[in-house]
Image (tube, rainbow, N blue to C red):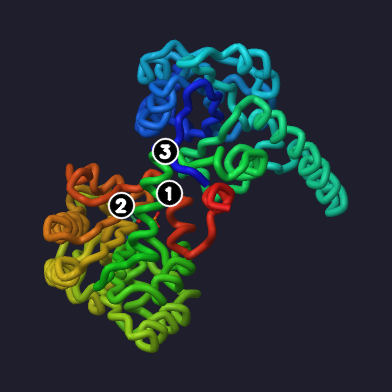
Amino acid sequence: MTSIDKFNFAGKKAFVRVDFNVPLDENFNITDDTRIRAAMPTLKKIIADGGSLIIASHMGRPKKNPDPKYSLKHILAHVSECLGVEVKFVDDCMKAAAAAAALKPGEALLLENLRFYAEEEGKPRGLAEDATDEEKAAAKKAVKASQKEFTKVLASYADCYVNDAFGTAHRAHASTALIADYFDADHKMFGYLMEKEVNAVDKVMANTVRPFTAIMGGSKVSSKIDIIENLLTKVDNLIIAGGMTYTFTKAQGGKIGNSICEDDKLDLALSLIQKAKDNGVNLVLAVDAKAADNFSNDANTQIVPVNEIPDGWEGLDIGPASEKLFADVIKNSKTILWNGPTGVFEFDNFTSGSRAVANAIVEATKNGAFSLVGGGDSVACVNKFGVADKVSYVSTGGGALLEAIEGKTLPGIAAIKG
Ligand code: AMP
């Protein structure tokens, strides 16, 4: 692979895979353009060099071709505005050869939603609900076969390939991974956003400065098992917070009242506690809870020991002793990963724990720690608390980041790195 900074795009056509999967309202107005803005440094560098852009993305989950609700036409004007160049549009990503060939240096072309074609994901479409296994296998084989041609056509538009779509890096799709095979190592690279994401993950998971603390929150253990298992081989401290706390508490014989709990994961919780001991990991669990008498912002509350939650009450956040316990560990860390809130942070009366974690991360970062915040809800937390620019890196890739933390190889990254 080469690097975007080193590459001179003058006179070159670049196929740039971006993640423009932005939310739209019912009138097709963009409600959050973060992802579009995030790709601009890459797109602008290519234009400034005198290259031309073939910009490609997916949006939503279209089920047919065309599927006007998911047309990238809705975002064309805004992309032009952000880029400062009038971007052309082709309403069929398989029919862009002439438009791509006609691009002059400094010009840009946006392709219609790649997922209008089943070949982008390589998953069959339109199978009858009662399709037999044989029919399913045949349909899959067919789409995989035509995926090769689809990928080849996309690759034929350009001289070089830039992947700046970290959000889809965990998918082995035509435009995120397979296309890289059509370019040699000197003509494929990460975009700036992707580079930042990859470097942030490497700093945390590979080139770790210790002590390394991970804070895992959220509602359920079951959705985070693979991550927790992998982190238990990497971290010095693992703070468990959020709803999954109560599965651990109950597994150890505590009283949790009506708190959220996965009764079929009690043994798993105990085995994770044992694994932490075996690996010398300091597993930090909440010691107190802010309990509520119903699941609402206006509920009556009391602070109780985490293992003595009265019947009829449920833990909706950690209590002040846990806040201090967690903050002390975080402040003494040199590498920090935060995924998931400590409580129901959507209710203003139950944000205190998540805020304490965020503040401790900010302080540690000021003192030289590297902090990575990722996964939907913790990103929402740092935004809500106005501290997103006070941590080292806020990841844009939910699923992709989680898979990277699980220790999986991401196809979009592997395809470029070779
Ligand atoms: P996740 O998607 O697994 O990261 O979970 C995030 C969700 O967990 C948020 O919507 C929180 O409201 C929820 N959550 C965190 N703590 C609790 C809790 N103690 N009880 C119920 N839900 C919680």
Density class for disc 1 (Cα within 10 Å; few <14, some 14-19, many ≥20) is some
Query: Can I make out residue 76 in this image?
Result: yes
Query: Can I make out residue 352 in this image?
Result: no
Q: Earlier in the sequence, mark 2 or mark 3?
A: 3
Question: Pointer 2 and pointer 1: residues touching (CB < 8 Å)?
Answer: no
Name the residue carrying label 1: 398
State the image quarter where residue 388 is shown: top left
Q: Which residue is painted at 13% across and 71% down in the image?
A: 328
Front tag of 1 and 3: 3
The Cα–Cα distance between marks 1 and 3, rounded to whole angstroms, is 29 Å
Ligand 1 is within 8 Å of the C-beta of the residue at disc 2: yes
Helix, strand or loop at mark 3: loop
Name the residue carrying label 3: 6
Question: Where does residue 2 sit, x and y in percent of width and height?
Answer: 49, 43
Question: Pointer 2 and pointer 3: residues touching (CB < 8 Å)?
Answer: no
Q: Earlier in the sequence, mark 2 or mark 1?
A: 2
Question: Pointer 1 and pointer 3: residues touching (CB < 8 Å)?
Answer: no
Name the residue carrying label 2: 378
Residue 113 to residue 356: above or below: above
Q: Which residue is painted at 51% across and 39% down in the image?
A: 163
Q: Earlier in the sequence, mark 1 or mark 3?
A: 3
Question: Where does residue 360 sit, x and y in percent of width and height?
Answer: 15, 60
Three-letter residue code for mark 2: Ser
The Cα–Cα distance between marks 2 and 3, rounded to whole angstroms, is 34 Å
The Cα–Cα distance between marks 2 and 1, rounded to whole angstroms, is 10 Å
Helix, strand or loop at mark 2: helix
Helix, strand or loop at mark 1: helix
Residue 175 to residue 413: above or below: above
